[in-house]
Amino acid sequence: MKMNQGSYKKAVVIGSLAAAVVASGLLIAARPAPSYVAHEWGTFTSVQGADGVLLEWRPLETSRLPKFVYDWTHAGLNRQPAGPLGPKSGMITLQRMETPVIYFYSPSELSVDVSVQFPRGFITEWYPQAAQIGPSSVRVPPTVARMDNYAHKVGVSSAFTFASLLANHGIKDSRVRWANIQILPEKQNPDLARALPLDRSGSHYFAARETDSDFLRTSSLSITNPSAEHAKFIFYRGVGNFTTPLRVTMVSENAAVLANTGQEPLDHLLVIESRDRAGNFIYVDHLAPGEQRSVAIDLTACNLPAEQLSRELGQQMAESLVRSGLYQREATAMVKTWTDSWFQEDGVRVLYVLPRAWTDRTLPLTLDPSPRELVRVMVGRTEVIPGAVQQRLGDALTKASKGDPKAREEAVAEFRKLGRFGEPALRLATKGANAEVNQIAWTLLQAAAAKPAVITKAF
């Protein structure tokens, strides 16, 4: 079959293009996939009464973080909170998402985009600076506002705005996104340890750095101060109104029923009771969906001193975290971060590892490019206010409302032990009480949070 000169040239061109496409495809296929690893841990804390019903509380009231961490009082980039977000002490919710951190491990430098959605909650703090976070609004520059106003006057659809084309614009849904996070291998960049920001506050932040994870670097995104920000992990926290898959019902002061109300098994449950610098715990390895299990905690039978209790709990918890997928140093860092809150505070609580599927539904996470391995270990913390505490507090408040000074002291002492869980305990203890009891209850709750000198004056 003969070809004319035009057909021949056309065939050559087509053949060359095809060869180029094939070669390009081969090159793309030969390009190594990202080999980095990402590990995340965090906690979800809720409060329940003795009947297992979730209680509303102020999860952010006593929260302390380093000053360099962003929140909605200094969100940067001209951002403002939208929707129900407001002052930390004024927020009342069912869940506190505490200190999720994401570590990265890569054999070479790599740029990653990180996006977290929180459809039933709100992100309240984060570091480093995020490219996008919402729900938020951004004050539109006057020039752009005038352009939008003119465009709409001449018939452009109101659904379109020039403001939406700006790099920094408001976000309607609840999510946070970090763009172009540079992963810098720790062994190749040891000097970057000195670039990490420091602060005297925030005990629940710096312990999380004690791992082998790589350093991270990103832009502050500020026009006036475009310096780089360095970190050992991506950090964020939030609040939400939803249930966790564990219900704890107190059948007596030293006995409880654990019920798995979720779709997946619950693993590594620690039932802890601590009082007056002593306590004990029971370990439950597995609770199937729909399963209920009774557990008994008898302080008089096996009462461990606070130091021993904290040490044994820490060892058990770290082992459970490693079995769930964390590296040993990550597990140790998480336990160190929360030792004072998990193991040393008076009260009854249950710690357990949340199912990965539950975490992915509640807090969808996207990494681009995708990692070779992604581990997410979230710990549920169910804080229980036993009936005995409710009764003791209610009796003290009733007597205090009648002018009993000793009862006032007892109520303040009880509120101090309860800490940030004092308000939900107050609501339980004063349910159905008269106005005088309610008034003295709120007065004494505030006094318990004040300095000793102020408390003396309040009496």
Image (spheres, rainbow, N blue to C red):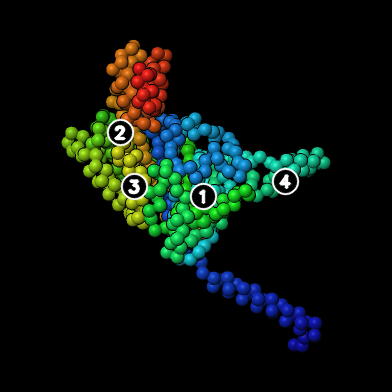
Residue 162, labelled with which disc? 4
Which residue lies under the disc numbered 1? Answer: 128
Q: Does the residue at mark 1 contact the one at mark 4 (Cβ under 8 Å)? A: no
* Mark 4 Cα-neighbour bin, 10 Å: few <14, some 14–19, many ≥20: some
**Looking at numbered disc 3 in the image, what kind of residue is underneath it?**
Lys
* Mark 3 Cα-neighbour bin, 10 Å: few <14, some 14–19, many ≥20: some
* Mark 2 Cα-neighbour bin, 10 Å: few <14, some 14–19, many ≥20: many
Residue lying at the far left of the rendered structure: 301
Q: CA distance from mark 3 to mark 4?
A: 48 Å
Comes first in the chain, label 4 or label 2 = 4
**Looking at numbered disc 2 in the image, what kind of residue is underneath it?**
Gly
Comes first in the chain, label 3 or label 2 = 3
Q: Does the residue at mark 4 contact the one at mark 2 (Cβ under 8 Å)? A: no
**Total of numbered circles in the picture?**
4
Label 2 element class: strand
Residue nearest the viewer, comparing 391 with 357:
391
Q: CA distance from mark 2 to mark 1?
A: 34 Å
Label 3 element class: helix
| Camera-side mark, 2 or 1 | 1
**Looking at numbered disc 4 in the image, what kind of residue is underneath it?**
Phe
- Measuring from the top left, give residue 173's x and y in whole percent: 58, 42
Residue lying at the far right of the rendered structure: 154
Residue nearest the viewer, comparing 161 with 192:
192
Label 4 element class: helix
Q: Residue at x 65, y 78 (%)?
A: 19
Residue nearest the viewer, comparing 414 with 34:
414
Comes first in the chain, label 2 or label 1 = 1
In this rendering, position of residue 200 left or right of residue 345 = right
Q: CA distance from mark 1 to mark 3?
A: 22 Å
Which residue lies under the disc numbered 3? Answer: 336
Q: CA distance from mark 4 to mark 2?
A: 54 Å
Which residue lies under the disc numbered 2? Answer: 347
